[in-house]
Amino acid sequence: MNSGRVRVLRPEELGEGERERWRELRAKSTAPRNPFMEPEFTDVVGRVRPRARVAVVYDGGEAAGFLPHERGPLGQGRAIGLGVSDCQGAVLRQDLAPDTRRLLRACSLSSFAFDNLEAEQGLFVPHAVEEHTTYVIDVEQGYEAYEKVLRARSPKFLKTTLAKERRLGRQVGDVRFVFDERDPAALRTLMAWKSAQYRRTGRRDRFAQEWITRLVGRLAGTRAPECTGTLSVLYAGGRPLAAHFGLRSTTVLACWFPAYDPDFAKYSPGLILHLRMAEAAAAEGIGMLDMGRGPAEYKDSLKTGELPVYEGAATRPGAGAALQWLGREPVRRAHGFVRARPRLASLAVRTLRGAARLRRS
């Protein structure tokens, strides 16, 4: 390891100088400034996840790297907020190249699992077992330039969505969009919609997990230049029809939890919401919206590009690493097998929805 000692701290134990050093290292990275990689996100996770830790790597007496993580039984480590965080990895000085196993040993970790590893993570990408795609919207040249891209690539989509927005205004009432809504009731509405969507589609309800609800609630009040909780809401006739909660830095809006009122599905309020979010983000000087990994029809319609993210685990020999493999690898392989076969994937989706209907009946 081209470095000296490693200190492992709780997130709240980091000094302001160390936090500022973290921000400096992120600013020098060539990767997009995703807010999930900022100290503020790790700090909030630490308030709801007692096993959250940060390894601070020193070189020549100065902090030269940070590895936010959570430590489980037998030292099974995982990326901070794994399961909800959409961008993961270490924050390192560009010339720093730690030895992965020695770093894990210094953290008392037998493994370090990730499922949305940032593409430029040279420390952990060699340990990836699967590459995924995250879908992005480029508004670096402004919203009008983005609309031109949509008109050229999928003119019917844009024309239809804008027509639905106008019809929504005529039939339901004045359409209003708020990029940064501070009303707690609107956040509760979004979480209720999202929970219902999870149940309707047969997926695990993330908001049934108390720590995720608490995490989102705390992040909604987080106001930092590179990590600000942002609730965006589309209203019509004075009532909310679609909403999204995510995190934004000065250059990236990380899309996280979008949902809409299914009673108004015919107007495609979710698509209208995303167009208005792109417009507002561009006006704020934000250059990219990251819609996250996982295919979806709305992402295909809205995207301008794609970026890779990685899934896998770095390990060192021991019982903890073996348990990590047994706990994750069979499930990951089963998911990969289904994703690679569209007909099987379609059947899986229908099965999940059918099971959800049975649970509701």
Image (spheres, rainbow, N blue to C red):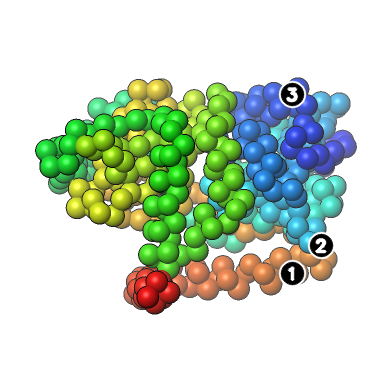
Q: Work out how far the residue at label 2 is from the one at label 1, CA to CA, in angstroms.
A: 9 Å
Per the image, label 3 sits on a secondary structure element best described as helix
The secondary element bearing badge 2 is classed as helix
- Residue shown at 80% from the left, 58% from the top: 75
The answer to whether residue 324 of the structure is visible from this angle is yes
Specify whether 181 is left or right of 50: left
Residue appearing at x 62%, y 69% in the figure: 329
Which dot marks residue 16? 3
Verify CB contact (< 8 Å) between mark 2 and mark 1.
Answer: yes
Residue type, label 2: Leu
Residue pictured at 33% horizontal, 49% vertical? 260
Residue at which label 2 appears: 74
Side (left or right) of 319 relative to 24:
right
The quadrant of the picture occupied by the C terminus is: bottom left
Please report the residue visible at 84 percent of the width from the left and 52 percent of the height from the top.
108
Q: Position of residue 27 (x, y in %)?
A: 60, 26
Badge 3 or badge 1: first in the primary sequence = 3
Check disc 1 and give the amino acid type.
Leu
Vertical comparison of 233 with 251: above or below: below
The Cα atoms of the two marked residues, 2 and 3, are separated by 31 Å
Quadrant assignment for the N terminus = top right
Residue behind mark 1: 323
Q: Nearer the viewer, mark 3 or mark 1?
A: 3
